[in-house]
Amino acid sequence: MSYDNELYQQVILDHNRNPRNFHAMDNATHQCHGVNPLCGDDITIYVDVDEASQTIREVSFTGSGCAISKASTSLMTTFLKGKSLDEARVVFSEFHRMILGEFDPTIEANHLGKLKLFVGIREYPSRTKCASLAWHTFIGALDRKTEGVSTE
């Protein structure tokens, strides 16, 4: 097993067992519900945005899902705190393109930081929806989608 693969597995397991920011948020300014009907991942993302500065004060989630889905959501919530809405949308785009194999963060400049651990998910196309559900739900929250989002 390569070091990168071992580190990926350790991070996924840690964030699955001990998800960060796993709670409903009463003061959320934005929220959205997302589902992956094929595997049962089901989450709600809560975001507290400082409207004056267009900065994310807080991000949290509730729900259930597979280890990849839960870990991706947990890492996303910790990574996006303090980011501007514009930065968050750039990170979403890079993350999504990375897991689809359209962007290589090991070669191209990026804003992904530790989220680069998910680069290997592109080798498992059936798991890309698990890793991206939280991100699409987050963007749905920012866009105030009241009908929620689905990976289908």
Image (spheres, rainbow, N blue to C red):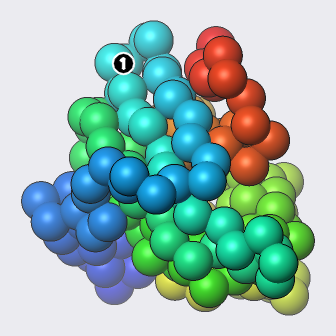
Q: Quadrant of residue 110?
A: bottom right
Q: Residue at x 32, y 66 (%)?
A: 21
The image shows residue 114, relative to residue 45, as above or below, that is below
Q: Residue at x 26, y 34 (%)?
A: 64
- Which corner quadrant holds the C terminus? top right
Q: Is residue 76 visible?
A: no
- Which corner quadrant holds the N terminus? bottom left
Nearest to the observer: residue 80 or residue 9: 80
Instruction: Residue 78 in the image: state x and y as whole percent.
Output: 45, 76
Residue 117 is left or right of residue 144, and the answer is: left
The image shows residue 5, relative to residue 69, as above or below, that is below
Nearest to the observer: residue 37 or residue 20: 20
Q: Amino acid under label 1?
A: Cys
Q: Which residue is disc 1 drawn over? A: 39
The image shows residue 73, relative to residue 134, as above or below, that is below
Instruction: Residue 13 in the image: state x and y as whole percent.
Output: 19, 62
Instruction: Residue 52 in the image: state x and y as whole percent.
Output: 82, 78
Residue 110 is left or right of residue 72, and the answer is: right
Label 1 neighbourhood size at 10 Å, few (<14), some (14-19), many (20+)?
A: few
Q: Is residue 48 visible?
A: yes
Instruction: Residue 75 in the image: state x and y as whole percent.
Output: 43, 68
